[in-house]
Image: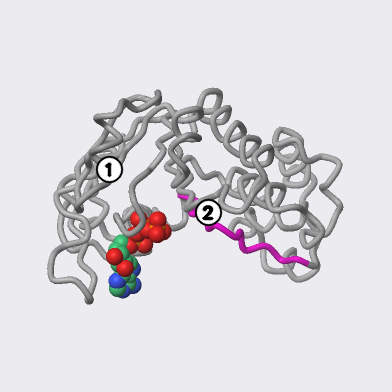
């Protein structure tokens, strides 16, 4: 279980904390939609969870251990959790498959990386994951030739092949056409339901209502809404 306990986050330009007293828990298999007005701190919260932003207060407990105090705790989160940016960083000249396999390089000897030789079980694992994400016919295409939604799904495949059990995604469907956006979110939801993946994604409210198991809304530096995935009431929307 993952527990955020009274997280505080400051930025140099503001006197007051941008995030103050943020507390919530995440269970395995949850897909959390993070919503809130522009500037409410969604990206900063995601960055704190991904250990890419410094915490200015609070505790971050994973299975009871405070990651902020544990030696190597931050590195472990950075290595084991996936942080998906809006425009996934893929090598455009390499195939989708090679980009997915990069996720396994941390366990791959240097000579294999240099020669590009891949173990057959790594190859099979990557192909299985690509197939699960509906991109088998694109596996040998260069990443630069894929659509935005396909690139997002390749980034998800890479995260899964790398063994990530938590995916933090900052606006993963921004700029995608509606069908591709729904495809990416349906893929993530299925992985949560069937594989126990945990996802926190900054996405538009109407998509969070449709695909997420839970919706967390930020306002005024605090959690203003924390409900199971469903249509928000007028009252809840007004709090954001
Ligand atoms: N590196 C930084 N230095 C100074 N201020 C920052 C920095 N990063 C974020 N902020 C400020 O913190 C606040 C929250 O930013 P954040 O990017 O988390 O908002 P957001 O909810 O993701 O917004 P948006 O929906 O527009 O992307 C904003 O007021 C922003 O200007």
Residue 51 shows in the view: no
Q: Is residue 135 left or right of residue 207?
A: right
For the point 16% across and 54% down, which residue is it?
20
The C terminus lies in quadrant: top left
The residue that label 2 is drawn on is 84
Q: Nearer the viewer, residue 234 or 109?
A: 234
For the point 32% across and 54% down, which residue is it?
45
Give the total of numbered labels.
Answer: 2
Q: Position of residue 87 (x, y in %)?
A: 60, 60
Q: Secondary structure at mark 1?
A: loop
Residue 129 shows in the view: yes
In the rendered structure, does residue 180 fall within the stretch colored magenta? no
> Residue 150 bears which disc, if any?
none
Q: Position of residue 168 (x, y in %)?
A: 45, 48
The N terminus lies in quadrant: top left
* Mark 2 burial class by Cα count in 10 Å: few <14, some 14-19, many 20+: many
Question: Of circles 1 and 2, which is in front?
Answer: 1
For the point 85% across and 54% down, which residue is it?
141
The residue that label 1 is drawn on is 240
Q: Position of residue 23 (x, y in %)?
A: 19, 42
Q: CA distance from mark 1 to mark 2?
A: 25 Å
Q: Quadrant of residue 90?
A: bottom right
Q: Is residue 177 above or below residue 229?
A: below
For the point 19% across and 52% down, which residue is it?
220
Prevailing SS of the magenta stretch: loop
Q: Is residue 25 left or right of residue 77?
A: left
Q: Which residues are magenta?
A: 81-92
Please, which residue is most extreme toward the bottom here?
Answer: 12
Q: Position of residue 214 (x, y in %)?
A: 37, 30
Q: Earlier in the sequence, mark 1 or mark 2?
A: 2
Classify the position of ligand 1 by quadrant: top left, top right, bottom left or bottom right: bottom left
């Amino acid at each position: 279980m993952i527990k955020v306990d009274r997280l505080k986050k400051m930025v140099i330009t503001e006197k007051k904390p941008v995030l103050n007293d943020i507390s919530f828990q995440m269970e395995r298999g949850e897909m959390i939609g993070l919503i809130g007005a522009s500037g409410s701190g969604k990206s900063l919260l995601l960055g704190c969870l991904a250990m890419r932003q410094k915490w200015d207060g609070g505790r971050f407990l994973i299975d009871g251990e405070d990651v902020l105090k544990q030696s190597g705790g931050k590195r472990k989160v950075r290595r084991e959790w996936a942080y998906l940016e809006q425009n996934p960083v893929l090598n455009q000249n390499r195939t989708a498959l090679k980009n997915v396999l990069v996720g396994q390089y941390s366990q791959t000897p240097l000579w294999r990386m240099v020669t590009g030789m891949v173990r057959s079980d790594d190859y099979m694992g990557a192909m299985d994951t690509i197939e699960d994400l509906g991109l088998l016919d694109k596996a040998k295409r260069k990443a630069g030739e894929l659509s935005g939604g396909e690139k997002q799904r390749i980034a998800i495949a890479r995260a899964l092949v790398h063994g990530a059990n938590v995916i933090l995604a900052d606006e993963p469907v921004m700029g995608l056409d509606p069908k591709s956006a729904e495809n990416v979110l349906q893929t993530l939801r299925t992985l949560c339901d069937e594989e126990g993946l945990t996802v926190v994604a900054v996405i538009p409210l109407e998509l969070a209502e449709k695909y997420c198991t839970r919706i967390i809304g930020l306002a005024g530096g605090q959690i203003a809404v924390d409900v199971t995935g469903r249509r928000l009431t007028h009252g809840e929307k007004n709090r954001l």
